[in-house]
Image (cartoon, rainbow, N blue to C red):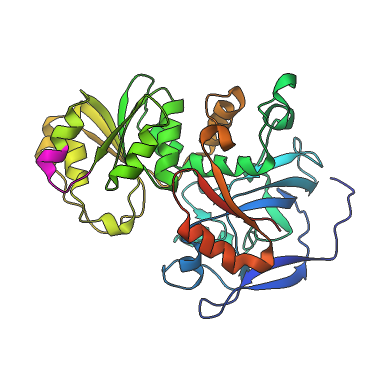
Amino acid sequence: MSSTKLPKTHRALVLTSTDEPLKVESLPTPQASPGSAIIRIHYAGVLSYMGDVYNGTRHYTFPTPFVTGTSAVGRVVTTGPDATLLQEGQLVIIDSLIRSRDEPSALFLSGLHDGGSIGSKKLMEGEWRNSTFAEYYKCPLENCHAVDEARLLGYPENGGLGYEIEDLIGVSRMLVPFGGLVDIDLRPGETVIVCPATGSFGGAAVQVALAMGARVIATGRNAEKLQKVASTNPRIEAVAITGDVQQDLFALQRFGPVDAFFDISPSAATQSTHFKSCILALRHGGRVSFMGGIHEDLLIPHYFIMRRNITLKGTWMYKREDIGALLKMVNVGVLKLGKEAGAEVVGKFGLDDWAQAFEVAKNNSAMGQSTMLAP
C-alpha cells in the first residue's frame, strides 16, 4: 500500500435526480480498501448520449445520488493491501464494466446503468457506486489495466509509438466491438459486414476488424460518410443501404462470399431492412454478432438461417480477457490510436463545463471523434 497522502476532499460531478442538473460537489476523497485502487483521473470519455442518460430521456436505472462517469485514463495514487502488481504512479486504463467476483453474470456499467440484476444492483448501490467524473476514483483492482507507458507514449526514435495520454481513451471505445468480433471468431482474411459503420462504435468496429486482418464491407445510410470511411483503407468497401432488400443484397454480394455480419445499430433502427439483406449475404456457415441498442424483436430470415447453418451471437460489451488481447494489439502497433488512426479529440473540458462537454459529444459522434472531461 502506498503511503501517499490523499486530500481530505475532492471535486466530483454528481447526479442527485434526473429532474435536476448535475452539480460539481466537494466530497470526501475515496480511500483504498482490499481489492481496490485509488486513481487520479487524467481524462474520462464523454459518450454522445450521456446527456440523455442523466436527464432521464433514456430510461437507464441507477442509484442516486452518485458520481457520474465512464471509462477513463489515470494514474495510481494508492492501492489496497492485497495489490501485488499495481504500483503508485502507474498509468492505467480504467474499464467501466464492473463484474461481480463471485457471480460472473452480475455486471454493470460504472456511471451509467446498474445492470438490471439483483447482484449488479447490489454492486452499484454499494462499494462501486461512484464513477470517474471526479478528481479521484476508487476502482476495483481488476478494472485497472496498467499500460506500457514507455512503449505507448515514448518517442518513436526510442521505440515508442508517440501517443498522448488522451489517445488512450480510444481503447475503451474499441473494446466494445472487439468483444462482439471475438465472440464470432473473426479471422484474418475473412470478410465482415459492419453496420452502421460511420458512428463512434461502428467506426471502431471497422478499425478493429481491419487490425484483426479482415476485409470490411462498411454499410449505413449516408453514402458520403461511408465513402470517407472507405477512403481510409484499401480493405474497406462501402455499401449504402437503400431500404430495398434485394438491391442491397446484390450490392453486398458483389464482393464475394461474406463470412460475418457485425451489427451495432441503435434502437431507432428496429424496422431497418439491413438486418435481412446483410444476413442473406452470408455464406453457408456465416456468423452474426448482434450488439447495439435494439430493444424490440426483429424480423429475420429464419428459413435461410436454418438451411445455411448461420450462427447468431448476442454480446453485451466484452469478456475480461478481451481487454488484455486488445492491449496487445495496441502495444505491437497493429491497432492504431490517435491521429495515426484518424482520431480527433473534439474537446477537453473541466468538470464545471460538463454541460458544454455533453453537447459537444452529442454533436460530434462520427468515426474517431471523442470528447472528454479532464477533472
**Identity of the residue drawn at 70% across and 30% down:** 148
Can residue 180 be seen here? The reply is yes
**Identity of the residue drawn at 75% across and 35% down:** 85
Front residue of 214/27: it is 214
Front residue of 273/228: it is 228
Residue positioned most to the bottom:
19
The N terminus is located in which quarter?
top right
Can residue 309 be seen here? The reply is no
Front residue of 81/63: it is 63
Snapshot quadrant of residue 154? top right
Q: Please give the count of numbered marks on the rendered protein.
A: 0
The C terminus is located in which quarter?
bottom right
In the displayed structure, would residue 33 be above or below residue 213? below
Snapshot quadrant of residue 30? bottom right
Report whether 335 appears left or right of 293: right
Snapshot quadrant of residue 338? top right
Q: Where residue 73 appears, x then y in whole percent? A: 66, 46
Report whether 17 appears left or right of 40: left
In the displayed structure, would residue 154 be above or below residue 104? above
| Residue range of the region highlighted in magenta in the rendering | 241-248
Q: Is residue 296 magenta?
A: no
Q: Is residue 246 magenta?
A: yes
In the displayed structure, would residue 328 be above or below residue 109? above
Q: Where residue 269 appears, x then y in whole percent? A: 27, 55
**Identity of the residue drawn at 75% across and 70% down:** 27
